[in-house]
Image: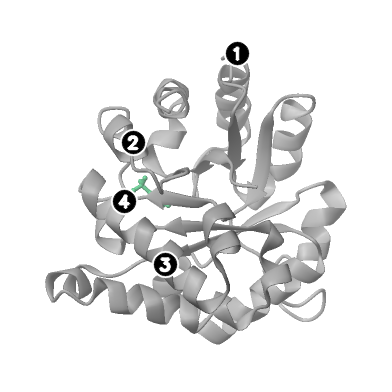
């Protein structure tokens, strides 16, 4: 079933004290009944975050995971390890992982497979580069990105998949897609999901928009009929801004 979701990707920010302070501030806000909130702290703050958020409506996700369950992968963390401490959601395919850490479609497919096998919820990110948009290739690129990754999975594998459309040119740049650009792309994404699978899956998958969403632009973006929420980077580091976004539906 489609949910309204606001997820905060903290990236490599917030030490132990900052995590505690931000989460305690978030906890003090009343959360609308029909909105799910997820925060994605760094690996080192996941355990503490789960403890602080116990009994609240705020969920915790990891920002990344390795596809293997264990072994000689120095510096990596598996789905099994995340599940072991109680983390049941993970972000896969963020543009920073794709560009800075060279995560290919094959790597992403293996991560998604491993997350599904571990019964984890996946926030799967994808989005076009500025040049793609300028040359009018954005729809084609999005189709390609989904066809070469998630469209390899069966319909039943999609039960715990949340999509996050994040145009790369809008991430951390202060430049956001216009509400109509976001809505137009989300509607296109439903169309290609319907073509590959069926209408029911296309209607029910949650599609978040990400890319410089702030309190001052969120209301218009969330008005898009096919926009089910947001994946928020910079603005998720400030409790007041993040909760203003949560309350913008
Ligand atoms: C992100 O990193 O997923 C993101 C959307 O960042 P920002 O909101 O800062 O653009």
Question: In the image, is residue 31 above or below residue 11?
Answer: above
C-alpha distance separating marks 3 and 1: 39 Å
Picture coordinates of residue 15, whole percent (x, y): 57, 38
Tell me the residue that label 3 is attached to: 191
Could you say which quadrant of the image residue 92 lies in?
A: bottom right
In front of the other: 12 or 69: 69
Q: Which residue is drawn at 70% across and 60% down?
A: 159
Q: Does the residue labelled 1 lie within 8 Å of ligand 1?
A: no
Could you tell which of marks 4 and 1 lies nearer the N-terminus? 1
Picture coordinates of residue 149, whole percent (x, y): 54, 79
Tell me the residue that label 2 is attached to: 223
Q: How crowded is mark 4: few (under 14 residues within 10 Å), some or many (20 or more)?
A: many
CB atoms at circles 4 and 1 under 8 Å apart? no
Could you say which quadrant of the image residue 170 lies in?
A: bottom left
Question: In the image, is residue 64 above or below residue 52?
Answer: below
In front of the other: 16 or 10: 10
Tell me the residue that label 4 is attached to: 183
Closer to the camera: disc 4 or disc 3?
A: 3
Which quarter of the rendered picture does the C terminus lie within? top left
In the rendered view, does 115 fall on the left or right side of 129? right
Q: Residue at x 66, y 51 (%)?
A: 43
Tell me the residue that label 1 is attached to: 28
């Amino acid at each position: 079933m489609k949910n309204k979701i606001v997820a905060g990707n903290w990236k490599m920010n917030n030490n132990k004290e900052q995590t505690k302070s931000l989460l305690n501030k978030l906890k003090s806000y009343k959360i609308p009944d029909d909105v799910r909130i997820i925060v994605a702290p760094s690996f080192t703050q996941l355990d503490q975050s789960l403890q602080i958020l116990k009994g609240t409506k705020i969920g915790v996700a990891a920002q990344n995971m390795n596809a293997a369950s264990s072994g000689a992968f120095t510096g990596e963390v598996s789905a099994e390890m995340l599940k072991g401490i109680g983390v049941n959601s993970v972000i896969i395919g963020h543009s920073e992982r794709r560009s800075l850490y060279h995560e290919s479609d094959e790597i992403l497919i293996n991560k998604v497979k491993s997350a599904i096998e571990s019964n984890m919820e996946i926030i799967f990110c994808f989005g076009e580069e500025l040049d793609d948009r300028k040359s009018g290739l954005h729809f084609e690129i999005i189709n390609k990105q989904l066809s070469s990754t998630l469209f390899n999975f069966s319909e039943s594998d999609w039960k715990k998949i949340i999509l996050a459309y994040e145009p790369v040119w809008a991430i951390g740049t202060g430049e956001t897609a216009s509400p109509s650009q976001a809505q137009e792309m989300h509607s296109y994404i439903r169309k290609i999901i319907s073509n590959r699978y069926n209408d029911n899956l296309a209607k029910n998958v949650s599609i978040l928009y990400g890319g410089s969403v702030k309190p001052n632009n969120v209301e218009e973006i969330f008005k898009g009929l096919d926009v089910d929420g947001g994946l928020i980077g910079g603005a998720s580091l400030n409790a007041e801004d993040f909760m203003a976004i949560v309350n913008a539906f």
